[in-house]
Image (cartoon, rainbow, N blue to C red):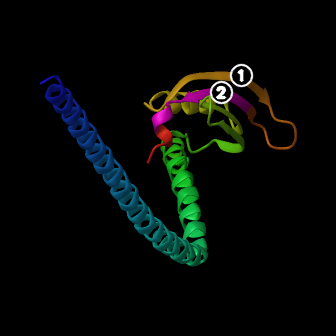
Amino acid sequence: MLQNRRKDRHSIGEKQKTWLAVILIGFLLLEGAGTGLFMVLSKAKQKSAVIMQGKLVSLQKEINDEQKNLTDSKAFQAQMKNLKFLVSSHIYFSPFFKELSNKTYNKVQYSSLTVDRTTGKVHIEGKTSSYTDIGKFILGLNTSGKFKDIKLLAATPTEGEVFGFNLSLDLFLKPEIFNK
């Protein structure tokens, strides 16, 4: 009886070893199959990468060819941008001259006119025949809503055969006069 028990135990140990061997062989087969599968997939991805690289090179060549054609377009676009800037920052002096001519007394002759666009300061020098004309000139400028702070700087008699006065005055413009 003792021998039978020993055989049974031995038989159970052999069964366990057999199962263990089957499981190990199964794991090895699965590992081999997985490795093979990964190798196949890796080669497929490599082929796909090579194909995509070829397409990328082809597209880059097309882009480079189109860039050559776009040079003229880019130059034109830069010119349009410059033109847009010039138009947006353009100063319109026509409304200023129209307002000045409407408010100037007709017996005054301008000899010099200086305009500082940044400050709005205008310096006028001219000639007229009398103090009364100077007063009418200043009064006319004061009636404009576009001019302010009109100051007579000097009124001196002219030299020469014709009697009159040289005048010099400053005034300031309201900034909206330069807008069209």
Circles 1 and 2: CB atoms closer than 8 Å? yes
Question: What is the x, y in percent for residue 43?
Answer: 45, 67
Query: What residue type is disc 2 on?
Result: Asp
**Number of numbered tags placed on the structure image:** 2
Q: Nearer the viewer, residue 32 or 48?
A: 32
Q: In percent of the image, x 74 and y 24: which residue is there?
A: 154
Measure the C-alpha gap from mark 1 to mark 2: 7 Å
Q: Is residue 32 magenta?
A: no
What residue sits right under mark 2 in the picture? 170
Query: Residue 121 location in percent, x, y?
Result: 63, 29
Q: Residues within 10 Å of mark 2 (few under 14, many from 20)?
A: some
Left or right: 157 with respect to 105? right
Q: Nearer the viewer, residue 59 or 98?
A: 59
Q: Which residues are magenta?
A: 167-176
Q: Nearer the viewer, residue 70 or 159?
A: 70
Q: Examine the structure image and report whether residue 171 is included in the region drawn in magenta.
A: yes
Depth-wise, is mark 1 or mark 2 nearer the camera? 2
Q: Residue at x 56, y 45 (%)?
A: 106
Please give left or right for residue 168 compared with residue 96 in the image: right
Identify which residue is drawn at 70% across, 39% down.
114
Of mark 1 and mark 2, the one earlier in the sequence is 1
Q: Secondary structure at mark 2?
A: strand
Q: Which residue is mark 1?
A: 153
Please, what is the dominant secondary structure of the magenta stretch? strand
